[in-house]
Image: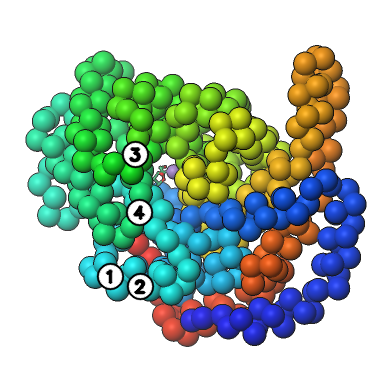
Amino acid sequence: MLIGSHKIDSHNEELLVSHKNKLVFTASEIAETENIIQKLIEFQIAIPSWALGTGGTRFGRFAGGGEPRSLEEKIEDVGLLHALNKASGAISLHIPWDIPTDHNAIKTLASQHGLRFDAVNSNTFQDQPNQEHSYKFGSLQNVNKAIRKQAVAHNIEVIQQGIELGSESLTVWLSDGSCFPGQLNFRKAYQNTLESLEEIYAALPSHWKLFLEYKCAEPNFYSTTVADWGQSYSYVKKLGDKAKTLVDLGHHLPNANIEQIVSLLLMEDKLGGFHFNDSKYGDDDLTAGALKPYQLFLIFNELVEGMDARGMNHASDLGWMIDASHNVKDPMEDLLQSVEAIMIAYAQALSVDKKALEIAQNENDVVKAQEILQTAYRTDVRALVAEARLRSGAALNPVELYRKLSVRDGLFAERGFKTVATGL
Ligand code: PSV
Ligand code: MN
């Protein structure tokens, strides 16, 4: 299924007058709107191949129907999202949930939709059919050398797949850890993991990065071997320049100050990328910005400040990915909402009066500092995000157009009601 540009144009025509009025008002409130719009046009967020089907919990999964049945259909779905918002121009694959059989054909299909391949993800948290050794007691940390070797070999195979597709990074997330005190010698688990990661790191092409994602708990509930940013930092620091920490917003203990973590990792040149989502209790994988949009803004405020301090390119120097899973929403609508929330937070952060903030900080003017941040947060920037879309040939209101064109009905007709996408 494709969305022709004439459909986008006629949708935009209907909304144009009202949009332009809002834009004029926004430009009267915010300085340097042109600069912000240009940055928004360049900013792309990768869609995870595992988020296009309905998510579930251990209690069940209520498939929504019309889900992609193959990697090709997942790429088509991301192509639909990108046609609607021109801000989702990349896909992140999880191996072996998505193994390309014909790399050239897959690459051609992706480029037809204007997509590139972002980080490839390895999976040593599940056993696959015909796998020799089980990961029940961990993979890279395992006390058994043969199991560690198998997990290392899998990661190297994922790198090979990524090379074929033109990816430039590998994300390693380990479920390794322990469920009970005494189960694990923490130091040995760390050392085994480090040794395994070193072998994987050695297989990286020179221009690649390795992202080491941390998570405080689940599926192990007593200890996790890469549990927090400090532990990830300790590994990536030892591995070398190409190794960086990946921050998934749902992977912290309650009330963690994620914006501070991000700021310090950037300062140390060890921030690699992001998995965006939102949460209330744990790794809830809810739509980005659905619960804590102010936190998302504060994170972007540190990102922009920290990237500018290092002269980094906002669009390309870090990996921007969504990692979410939707139990009750149409996954495509949810992803459109996540991308929108991320773009809004980024635009708000770009609009912060940084010079005034620096003066307020140097003068210990706490009230002024709060005023500056909250002015940026409370000024409606949605017209800037919409204008970036308009100029890129995307829809002024992607969710509205998705519904108006009955995209999901079209997917039901093409794929049926009983399809189930691979993933969690
Ligand atoms: C683990 O919870 C995680 O955040 C990792 O990024 C995995 O690759 C992904 O979720 C699996 O759904
Ligand atoms: Mn993640």
Whether 111 is drawn above or below 338: the answer is below
Circles 2 and 1: CB atoms closer than 8 Å: yes
Q: Give how far apart the Cα atoms at labels 2 and 4 are.
A: 14 Å
Residue at numbered disc 4: 167
**Is 30 in front, or is 214?**
30
The reply, left or right, for residue 300 in relation to residue 12 is left
| Residue with the mark numbered 1 | 104
Instruction: Name the residue at 82% across, 14% down.
Output: 363
Assign the C terminus to one quadrant of the image: bottom left
N-terminal label among 4 and 1: 1
Give the structural element (helix, strand or loop) at label 1: helix
Secondary structure under badge 4? Answer: loop
User: Where ligand 1 lies, by quadrant?
Assistant: top left
Find residue 224 and report its image quarter.
Answer: top left
Q: Which x, y percent locates residue 63?
A: 45, 66
Residue 234 lies left or right of residue 156; in this view the side is right
- Secondary element under disc 2, as helix, strand or loop, is helix
Q: Distance between the Cα atoms at labels 1 and 3?
A: 24 Å
Rendered position, 196 above or below 4: above
Residue 210's tag is 3
Q: Earlier in the sequence, mark 1 or mark 3?
A: 1
Which residue corresponds to the image point at 10% horizontal and 47% vertical from the top-left?
Answer: 132
Callout 4 amino acid: Ser
Q: Is mark 4 within 8 Å of ligand 1?
A: no
Is any atom of residue 297 visible in this view?
A: yes
